[in-house]
């Protein structure tokens, strides 16, 4: 597997003028928690690396591999959400004025001590993400069933975090991921049905609450994003269409297997300096000297 990186976010994220550092702590669960995006990414990545019988079971491999690629973007999206929620949490000042005093009263002091107010590979209580969260049994049915369970757990946690903070960035990110995560739930359900004959979609939705109950999901469902599964590849993984077909169980719309990436994207935020955190620690004079060195190296 070769990954191709594109310098953009999955979607545009709003950047309001007020921080929510405790909300950012809650959103950390969607990044480094047991059911967070780092878990979905690494579960599917290792399963795709270690998949047995690719030639005989190609459509199942293509499902896992294509969702792996999407999860990379989801990790980046959640991390940037946390970063935006932390912007403006403190203000520059003389060290003796205690410019980082806010950090001692928030849930995750690690955001202020370790990472200069940016995302960490931790859960909402500051526990590091753990590789033991990865399940790669080598048994196709076991792994598909686990992935279905993992996506349902992720969906549950997204709903709860959505209800914990009304910060616009968190809501926009969570609403989008509820829709895309719902696609992954259905993809693994359909893969299980293809492999076993059992109609797992009869269990939908878990929890028993449709995505349309959340304001931030409706724009994506109106655009049909709950019915599209992407290959995230220019030429490969097209056998997802052998499994991702038929109609959506919630609205009866036709499922679409899409080659490549979605036709929408977002700008990756350019995070501001945080002088009180010594980040990035490059002065105006330093920038001038760096620019001069870059010019000389380019022969200008």
Image (tube, grey):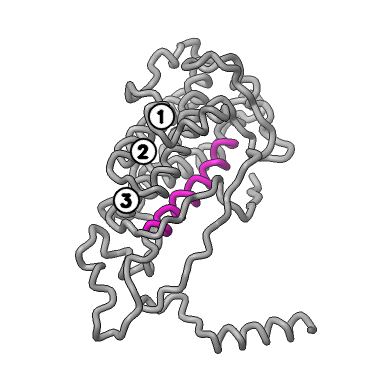
Look at 40% across and 18% down and name the residue there: 204
Q: Residue at x 27, y 60 (%)?
A: 108
State the image coordinates of residue 278 (x, y, percent, origin top left): 40, 79
Tag in front: 2 or 3: 2
The Cα atoms of the two marked residues, 2 and 3, are separated by: 13 Å
Q: Residue furthest front?
A: 17
- Residue at 43%, 52% in the rendered image: 81
Q: CA distance from mark 2 to mark 1?
A: 18 Å
Query: Which span is picked out in magenta?
Result: 65-85
Q: Is 71 one of the magenta-colored residues?
A: yes
Q: Are marks 2 and 1 in contact (CB under 8 Å)?
A: no
The image quadrant of residue 58 is top right
| Residue in the foreground of this view, choosing between 7 and 48 | 7
The dot on residue 123 is: 3
Q: Which residue is farthest right?
A: 299
Which label belongs to residue 158? 2
Our reading of the magenta stretch's main secondary structure is: helix
Residue at image mark 1:
146
């Amino acid at each position: 597997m070769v990954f191709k990186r594109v310098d953009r976010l999955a979607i545009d994220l709003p950047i309001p003028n007020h921080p929510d550092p405790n909300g950012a702590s809650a959103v950390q669960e969607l990044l480094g928690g047991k059911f967070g995006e780092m878990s979905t990414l690494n579960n599917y990545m290792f399963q795709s690396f270690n998949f047995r019988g690719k030639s005989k079971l190609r459509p199942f491999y293509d499902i896992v591999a294509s969702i792996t690629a999407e999860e990379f973007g989801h990790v980046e999206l959640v991390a940037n959400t946390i970063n935006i929620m932390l912007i403006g949490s403190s203000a520059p000042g003389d060290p003796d004025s205690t410019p980082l005093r806010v950090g001692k009263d928030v849930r995750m002091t690690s955001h202020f001590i370790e990472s200069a107010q940016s995302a960490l590979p931790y859960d909402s209580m500051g526990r590091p993400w753990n590789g033991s969260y990865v399940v790669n049994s080598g048994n196709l049915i076991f792994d598909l069933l686990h992935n279905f369970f993992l996506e349902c757990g992720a969906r549950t946690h997204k709903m709860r975090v959505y209800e914990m903070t009304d910060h616009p960035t968190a809501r926009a990110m969570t609403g989008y991921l509820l829709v895309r995560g719902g696609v992954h739930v259905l993809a693994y359900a359909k893969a299980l049905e293809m492999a076993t004959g059992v109609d797992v979609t009869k269990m939908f939705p878990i929890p028993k609450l449709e995505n349309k109950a959340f304001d931030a999901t409706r724009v994506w469902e109106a655009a049909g994003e709950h019915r599209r599964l992407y290959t995230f590849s220019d030429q490969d993984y097209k056998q997802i269409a052998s499994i991702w077909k038929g109609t959506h169980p919630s609205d009866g719309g036709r499922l679409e297997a899409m080659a490549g990436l979605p036709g929408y994207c977002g700008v990756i935020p350019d995070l501001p300096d945080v002088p009180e955190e010594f980040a990035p620690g490059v002065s105006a004079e330093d920038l001038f000297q760096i620019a001069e060195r870059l010019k000389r190296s380019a022969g200008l």
